[in-house]
């Protein structure tokens, strides 16, 4: 019996030692990072575990992210946005059950709007929320909560962000651009006729409406309440590439 008790004691201490060695890994696993796809493709290559984007994100956080895919990703147009809402319900359910102490979400394109709707139903906070090329759509502003750290990554040259905004934003941009073009045309005619007073008036009016058009263009890219990063010539797909990630990760993934 004495031998048995000693052997039991040895096993118990061995188990404690193993658990102590494993403790850092357990703490590391308490952080969870979720990738969310954009519209029109539930299986974008950037989310796959062999992609350089996946490796860059995994290297940043120190563990591989997990993928969430929403499949009703063609129905993203006004006035109903049914795909975004359906995806949001599914994403909220997924995130509420995924576990982990610190939750990070990285969403591309309309995946950010799916996340915005999902956050309305979340029963847990988000540590880092990063929108990569998400269209800032004013129809969806009434939905969504906030994260401890929220970054919006945009490109001035990204036409897909613009196209995914609300009809109100798109219309106002088009209207202001049309008026600006008309004013500049009138200025050219005035200059041809030697009417310099009218030329100055039309040039000033054209510049005003061009500035208004620029405001509406940027309204589709700048998120209120977020840390906004604006790139110059990147396309929509470029915004999930490693160079963009490395440029923003110190501000968006480490604070």
Image (cartoon, grey):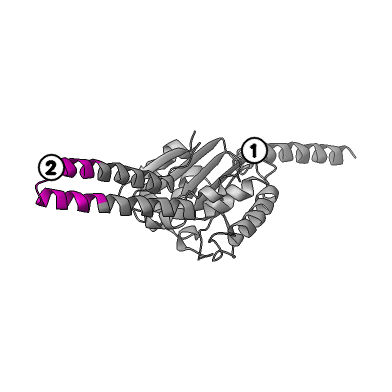
Q: Which residue does the numbered mark 1 point to in the structure image?
A: 23
Residue 23 in the image, given as x and y percentages of width and height:
64, 38
Seen at 62% across and 54% down, the residue is 88
Seen at 50% across and 61% down, the residue is 48
> Residues in magenta?
183-204
Q: Main secondary structure of the magenta part?
A: helix
Q: In the depicted view, which residue is nearer to us: 225 or 51?
A: 225
| Quarter of the figure that contains the N terminus | top right
Seen at 48% across and 48% down, the residue is 136
When asked about the image quadrant of residue 24, the answer is top right
Answer whether residue 200 is magenta in the image.
yes
Answer whether residue 161 is magenta in the image.
no
The image shows residue 115, relative to residue 15, as above or below, that is: below
Mark 1 vs mark 2: in front: 2
Q: Could you tell whether 2 is left or right of 60 in the image?
A: right
Could you tell me if the residues under marks 1 and 2 are in contact, i.e. CB atoms within 8 Å? no
Residue 79 in the image, given as x and y percentages of width and height:
57, 59
**CA separation, marks 1 and 2?**
78 Å
Q: Which residue does the numbered mark 2 point to in the structure image?
A: 196
Mark 1 or mark 2, which has the lower sequence index? Answer: 1
Residue 3 in the image, given as x and y percentages of width and height:
85, 40
């Amino acid at each position: 019996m004495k031998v048995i008790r000693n052997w039991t004691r040895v096993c118990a201490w061995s188990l404690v030692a193993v658990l102590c060695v494993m403790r850092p890994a357990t703490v590391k696993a308490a952080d969870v990072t979720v990738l969310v796809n954009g519209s029109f493709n539930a299986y974008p290559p950037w989310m796959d575990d062999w992609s350089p984007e996946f490796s860059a994100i995994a290297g940043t956080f120190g563990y591989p992210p997990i993928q969430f895919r929403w499949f009703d990703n063609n129905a993203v147009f006004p006035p109903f946005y049914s795909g975004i809402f359906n995806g949001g319900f599914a994403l909220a359910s997924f995130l509420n059950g995924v576990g982990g102490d610190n939750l990070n979400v990285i969403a591309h394109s309309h995946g950010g709007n799916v996340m915005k709707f999902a956050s309305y139903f979340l029963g847990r906070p988000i540590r880092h929320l990063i929108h990569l090329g998400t269209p800032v759509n004013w129809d969806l502003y009434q939905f969504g909560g906030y994260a401890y750290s929220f970054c919006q990554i945009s490109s001035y040259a990204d036409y897909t962000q613009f196209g995914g905004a609300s009809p109100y934003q798109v219309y106002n941009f088009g209207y202001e651009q049309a008026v600006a073009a008309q004013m500049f045309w009138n200025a050219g005619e005035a200059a041809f006729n030697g009417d310099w007073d009218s030329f100055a008036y039309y040039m000033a009016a054209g510049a005003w409406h061009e500035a208004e058009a620029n405001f509406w263009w940027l309204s589709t890219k700048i998120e209120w309440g977020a840390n906004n990063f604006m790139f110059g010539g990147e396309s929509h797909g470029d915004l999930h590439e490693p160079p963009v990630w490395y440029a923003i990760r110190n501000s968006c993934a480490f604070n």
